[in-house]
Image: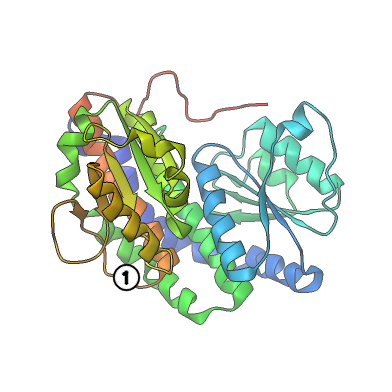
Amino acid sequence: MLGAELQMASELQEAPEAVRRQADALTAPLATLIGWSRRSNPALVVTCARGSSAHAATFAKHLFERHLGIPVAAAAPNVATIYRQRLQLKNQLLLTISQSGRSDDLTEFTLMAKAAGALTAAIVNDTDSPLAAACDIVLPTAAGPELSIAATKSFVASLAVLLRVLAEWKEDDALRAAIGRFPERLALAAALKWDETVDPFSRADSLATIGRGPTLAIAREAALKLKETCNLHAEAFSGAEFQHGPMALVSQHYPLLLFMPTDAAAAGLREFAADLRRKGALVFAAEHGRPNAGRLPVLPPEHPDVDAACLIQTFYALAVRIAVRRGTNADQPRHLQKVTRTR
């Protein structure tokens, strides 16, 4: 199968239009959410998500903690589905993120949180889903149908919704302007080629993806996609966490893919990359700058959080090429289905 024939390849190209059209659909529910935040001044945001949506929740954690100073905690849905424990969430925000809105554990946790007094909001593609019906506020991703099992445009659209939430909550005109340019930048990012990685990644038995700050979520999503679409084991780390036990894995046979942020986290991760190379690691860094060995092309920096979201679009195009090289079907990964219903 040629990469261009894959549904995944065509759907990732639809992400820019999804981001464009979601703006109108979000106007009313986003105003409701921001109005509530002004009145309630929540001290905590709890996120609830699985799979790629959990990586979007990681992005939300960075955005809300970094820019709003509000702690963000990831829910354990089995607290509701198995242990039947109600959490103390009165006047706090529960943000549930799901493409399908049909995973039972996410809906049950959401209903528990609502009963506990939380405001419940869903970032969801299917606005007719059980999750959407359970929530006080529905924030549509407007991604449209996604037939490939691997989420691409729906993940990017979820990041765009989170960026819009932050821009309005913070009243950030610079971020609003960057979101306006986001669709065009996504199209440009999809056209970038990370040719240098195709052979070593296709031959690898395992690799690591590394990020920091806004790019940690991107590293986690990339690792999942390598497992899911390429049958290639990959594990994601923050640049700080890798320096503990995982550092022992460093060798020329264990490729490392670094997603370089464009904010204050960049300097430390750049130093870390240099140290990895001194230790003999096979390092590839997605980083703006003069072309050299191991540096993968990215768009010129514009806004750190939007820059990070653009990186996954370039990676998705790479994942298609690796899947073809390894002979896997990225649209229909073995043992998986589009809607995973856990409890």
**Residue 197 seen in render:** yes
From what the image shows, is residue 94 above or below residue 305?
above
Quarter where residue 92 is shown: bottom right
Relative depth, front residue between 54 and 145: 54
Farthest-out residue, bottom: 173
In the image, taking residue 184 as reference, residue 89 lies left or right, namely: right
**Which structural element holds mark 1?**
loop
Give the colouring mode of the picture: rainbow
Give the image quarter of residue 32: bottom right
Left or right: residue 136 versus residue 202 is: right
Residue wearing tag 1: 301
Dot 1 crowding, Cα within 10 Å, few <14, some 14–19, many 20+: some
Q: Quadrant of the C terminus?
A: top right
Q: Position of residue 185 (x, y in %)?
A: 31, 65
Location of residue 104 in the rendering, given as x and y in whole percent from the top left corner: 68, 31
Q: Is residue 151 left or right of residue 63?
A: left
Of residue 229 and residue 286, the one placed in the foreground of this image is 286
Q: Quadrant of residue 286?
A: bottom left
| Three-letter code, disc 1 | Pro
Q: Is residue 204 above or below residue 275?
A: above
Q: Residue furthest top?
A: 335
User: From the viewer's perspective, is residue 23 above or below residue 176?
Assistant: above
**Which of these two is toward me, 2 or 203?**
203
Q: Nearer the viewer, residue 192 or 10?
A: 192
| Location of residue 167 in the rendering, given as x and y in whole percent from the top left corner | 55, 72
Residue 177 relative to residue 196: left or right: right
The picture places residue 65, in percent across and down from the top left corner, at: 61, 63
Q: Is residue 151 shown to the viewer in this render? A: no
**Rendered residue at 52%/49% (across/down):** 56
| Total tally of numbered discs in the picture | 1
The quarter of the picture where the N terminus appears is: top left
